[in-house]
Image: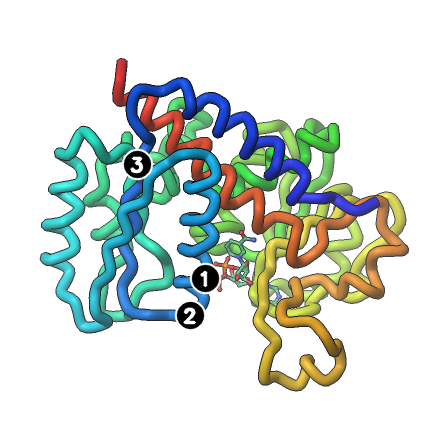
Amino acid sequence: MLLDGKKIRDRIEKELAHEIHTLKDKPTLAILQVGLREDSTAYINQKRIFAEKIGAFIIHKQYPETVEENEIIHDIHNFNRDSSVHGIILQIPIPEHLNRKLLIDAIDPHKDVDGLSSANTKKLWEKDLTGYIPATTKGILALLEAYKIDIQGKKVVVVGRSTLVGKPTALALLNKNATVTICHSKTENLSQETLQADILIVATGHPLLIKKNFVKPGQIVIDVGINLIKGTKLEEEIPGKKFVGDVDFENVKDIVEAITPVPGGVGPLTVASLFENLLTAYKQSKI
Ligand code: NAD
């Protein structure tokens, strides 16, 4: 079975548009982008398109690659004080000379709709449901819920331990009573671990890492990876594709119970989940 992220995204989009239509003012998201990375610009465009569809507003603030931390922090503080701005995100990755943690922690936790600040991370750690869950993790939860896939008591293997995806996803699933294993680049015998999973979640940025011998019948496979193969050797092997996931979809799809496509799986839900967080932030700002 194909786990269709676009279908669920469309449903969330309708619900958000319907609710936002009834509001006095527009939920507003400030996006801070440093430099001109093509992939970041593409992700921001997806957010902009989604925002337009649901009636939210985007402020896109761009900085040159050489910007100083102080300048960004100054703007974050202004957005924190501005009651017409409900969410603030820093588009990641950012250049090496900038301290990501310092910048993200400058965002008011109530406006940290990416859920990446220390305050929101602590809430996820402590299973405090008042925090924002990072959008990709929230999207994965939405996908599992929409397809009525049980989490409680299941063996979940998360491949990847990044602060952005792997760790928050592992924690969120642990909070839902899964038995969670986290694998990473130093894990020995990765396939031995992945074969244990009821639900396998892969977020490595390593194209087609998970081959057919890494999976077995009955498994649910969630592929978070988005890898641009244009201009690489893989482009010749998989003609007509611009992006591939971290899972060798063509050779895995007929073995497992259910799998997300790339694109069209987790990606669309990440965007939708961000705007669900924004609407929550908007509502909380009115209390
Ligand atoms: P990252 O580079 O920060 O982390 C990658 C993780 O994978 C690391 O923890 C590393 O230990 C692990 N890893 C790398 N190679 C491995 C290997 N051979 N075996 C086992 N583990 C390995 O990346 P990230 O930010 O977590 O993103 C991962 C992927 O997910 C990327 O392709 C990224 O583009 C994609 N992504 C997709 C979405 C979405 O909405 N679908 C959102 C964020 C990131």
Gap between marks 3 and 1, in whole Å?
Answer: 19 Å
Residue 28, label in figure: 3
Any part of residue 125 in sight: no
> Which circle marks residue 42 in the picture?
1
Disc 2 target residue? 38
Q: Quadrant of the C terminus?
A: top left
Q: Could you tell me if the residues under marks 1 and 2 are in contact, i.e. CB atoms within 8 Å?
A: yes
Residue displayed at 23% across by 35% down: 85
Q: Are marks 3 and 1 in contact (CB under 8 Å)?
A: no
Query: Cα distance, mark 1 to mark 2?
Result: 6 Å
* Type of amino acid under label 1: Ala
Camera-nearest residue between 232 and 193 = 232
Res. 142 image quadrant: top right
**Above or below 232: residue 24:** above
Looking at the rendered structure, the secondary structure element under dot 2 is helix
In the image, residue 19 lies at what x, y percent? 46, 21
* Callout 1 secondary element: helix
Establish whether ligand 1 lies closer than 8 Å to the Cβ of label 1. no
Q: Residues within 10 Å of mark 1 (few under 14, many from 20)?
A: few
